Image: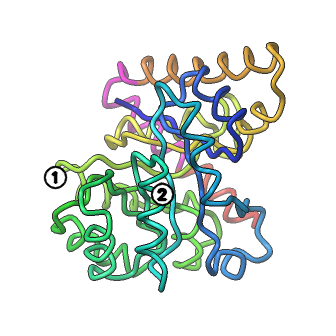
Amino acid sequence: MFNLMILVSTPDQAVIAQKGGVDRIFYDLEYINKAARQIGRNTVISNNDINDIPAIKSVLTDSKLLVRTNPIHAYTRSEVDKAIEYGADILMLPMVTATEEVQQYVDYVNGRAKVCIMIETSQALARAKNFIKVDGVDEFFVGLNDLHISMKLAFMFELLSGGIVEYLADIFNEAGKPWGFGGIARIGEGTLPAEKILAEHVRLGSQSVILSRTFKGLLDRSSDIQIGNFDEEIQKIRNAYDEISAWDKATFERNTDEIGAIVNKIVHNV
């Protein structure tokens, strides 16, 4: 199954996303150190309140609720306990640097929800083979934005064209751990076209992706027309995924080469 995830901040947005066929409603609590490390970048920093989780959960009947907590800090146990009490199905830990942090988080969750560990620091990249050995980790997600910042790269999709994502894919696939990476724009959009990125998800065996802010913009209006547009854009991704899944090896290789050329051009112009 290829899970589509989208960041929401209100129950109304969650309702539209669920109706459109989004698999996971993503509620983000992360704020610690985020503004400092992403300063000057065109990124979104959430201002969500953990006490609003029950309102989001109450409208979900089909979609799962994924809650991203803060990195390990003094009050992580309390944050984890509250998120689970309020109905989180999956808890995501960002900015991991050490295996001990992974183990600590798993211990806090204690089997009450699924655990997703983010790979988005250079330390996590180097230690991913150790992370998969921690019992209780259900899946992984490669955060391209923070990882490329950590590695001092010019463009986050250098991680895809440069083979870093494929390196991690091999680790996770061999261990039988579900994983995903990055974000995706609407089909036909994106500096690096969305369908080309989607093809790499298929080729590498990724099982999840975050829908970009171009999708979230469709959640900000609640008219029937807007809901219909969101549904249509989600279906375009599903259709493209099915079509790409039928590609032969040569077509995938050509797509990978084309991504490399586009990324190189973007980096040259930065």
**In the displayed structure, would residue 20 be above or below residue 134?**
above
Q: Quadrant of the N terminus?
A: top left
Indicate which label's residue lies in the foreground, 1 or 2.
2
Tell me whether circle 1 and circle 2 mark residues in contact (CB < 8 Å): no
Q: Residue lying furthest bottom in this view?
A: 74
Instruction: Locate residue 183, reporting x and y percent.
Output: 57, 47
**In the displayed structure, would residue 99 be above or below residue 227?**
below
- Mark 1 lies on residue: 174
- Mark 2 lies on residue: 83
Residue at 48%, 74% in the rendered image: 95
Disc 1 crowd rating (10 Å Cα; few below 14, some 14-19, many 20+) is: few
Q: Is residue 247 left or right of residue 87?
A: left
Q: CA distance from mark 1 to mark 2?
A: 31 Å
Range of the magenta residues? Answer: 245-259
Residue 84, quarter of picture = bottom left
**In the displayed structure, would residue 48 be above or below residue 211?**
below
Task: Verify whether residue 249 appears in magenta.
Answer: yes
Residue at 40%, 50% in the rendered image: 90
Question: What is the secondary structure assignment of the residue under circle 2?
Answer: helix
Residue at 31%, 70% in the rendered image: 108
Residue at 40%, 45% in the rendered image: 89
Q: Number of callouts in the render?
A: 2
Q: Amino acid at mark 1?
A: Glu
Q: Nearer the viewer, residue 6 or 236?
A: 6
Instruction: Locate residue 264, reporting x and y percent.
Output: 61, 59
Disc 2 crowd rating (10 Å Cα; few below 14, some 14-19, many 20+) is: many
Q: Nearer the viewer, residue 240 or 224?
A: 224
Instruction: Locate residue 180, reporting x and y percent.
Output: 40, 48
Which comes before the other along the chain, label 1 or label 2? 2
